[in-house]
Image: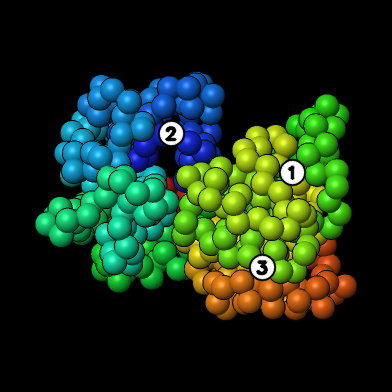
Amino acid sequence: MRTAIVHDWLVSLSGAERVLLELHKMFPEAPIYTLFHDKVFTSKYFPDAEIRSSFLQRIPLITKRHKYLFFLMPTAIESFDLSDFDLVISSSAIFSKGLVLKPRTRHICYCYSPTRQLWDLNAQKIGNCLSAGKAGKFEIGNYVGKHFLRLWDRQASDRVDEFVAISKHVQQRIWKYYRRNAKIIYPPCDINSKSEILNPKQIQNSKLKIENFDNYYLIVSRLYLHKNIDVAIEAFNKLNLPLVIIGTGPEQKRLRQKIENNRITMLGFIADEQLPYYYLNCRAFILPQEEDFGITPIEAMSFGKPVLALRKGGAIETIMEGVTGEFFDDPIAEGLADGIRRLEENYPNYNSDKIKLHSQAFLGTNFRDKIMELINYK
């Protein structure tokens, strides 16, 4: 059975790209079609993959200018000729679901969410979602353009043979906006297996960065406006507790300026090989934002660490209140601070082994088994 994989674009490593890596391991011979890609990125993370990009790849600086070119992307995704393939798996957050395929070609869409910038985030500027509020950035802003893309997105969903959702939360959105049923297969999370990759030099370098921290709380996130990192900083400013923030993004400079507590540190980018050190040595993990699924809290739980999360989105499905962590209800500093208080009160009751066991439901082996079960169903 000839198989192809399609992904929106390849420029950075986030949850969707980690899923794509797993799909590539499952189907190493399958070419990966993408609208455009950063060659440095793909050579590092997909060195042995056959990457086939659309005509957008020929546009100079496309990886930096793509926010200006959303109106071209429906045409670009429809331009792929996949007539030689029996199975196509699209890894889609926005455009990949819109492939035009032969009737005999089976299309399974692993959907991270119906295009949020067009549906449940419709009232917000797409520039805020994709460039974290940078003034002057391109947005699908005018009503006519946004309406056209919404019509295209809805029609494109009808071309998919089978939808797979990353969570119940996304499953409900797929039904609401596309009126399509979806099977749930949680994304893979295997970061704990990378602990052995750490060598003594890497551990030493990591320790130097947080040598003054004891029992620190941890956030691992891209630094975008909707990630609510400013809420966490405000809360920890008042609590005077240690907080380590890992990640980069357009909000980095603004967030640094909000720090008043010298026990808060922003480490920027940390390679996957070093991340286990920070999970292993933190007191608890903080998830201040709504996520469609949320891989980072699963990563923290795989090291036996409790999680404090906003009571929204995929976290409701992955965190057991009072057993693997706690929730707070409002994305404000006072709500998060109250959650810290409750987490600390319950801290002696958390069982590291139980938390680790719970995280095993999201291992890559489970993901692979369920994907193969779906493929072999027909």
Q: Can residue 298 be seen in this view?
A: no
Q: Residues within 10 Å of mark 1 (few under 14, many from 20)?
A: many
**Residue pointed to by mark 2:** 11
Q: Residues within 10 Å of mark 2 (few under 14, many from 20)?
A: some
Q: How far apart are marks 2 and 3 (CA)?
A: 33 Å
Amino acid at the residue labelled 1: Pro
**Residue pointed to by mark 3:** 235
Along the line of sight, the residue nearer the viewer: 266 or 53: 266
Dividing the picture into quadrants, the one containing residue 129 is: bottom left
**Residue pointed to by mark 1:** 276
Which of marks 3 and 2 precedes in the sequence?
2
Vertical position of residue 55 compared to residue 224: above or below: above
Vertical position of residue 252 compared to residue 37: above or below: below
Percent coordinates x, y for residue 133 in the rendering: 39, 53
Q: Distance between the residues labelled 1 and 2?
A: 23 Å
Question: Secondary structure beneath disc 3?
Answer: helix
Which residue is at a point 48% across and 36% down the rendered structure image? 12
> Nearer the observer, disc 1 or disc 3?
3
Amino acid at the residue labelled 2: Val
Q: Distance between the residues labelled 1 and 3?
A: 25 Å
Which residue is at a point 62% across and 38% down the rendered structure image? 269
Residue 46 as seen in the image, left or right of residue 81: right
Residue 175 as seen in the image, left or right of residue 13: left
Dividing the picture into quadrants, the one containing residue 174 is: bottom left
Q: Is residue 345 visible?
A: yes
Judging from the image, the colouring scheme is rainbow
Which of marks 3 and 1 precedes in the sequence?
3
Which residue is at a point 23% across and 47% down the rendered structure image? 98
Vertical position of residue 252 compared to residue 215: above or below: above
Percent coordinates x, y for residue 186 in the rendering: 53, 57
Amino acid at the residue labelled 3: Ala
Percent coordinates x, y for residue 243 in the rendering: 73, 56
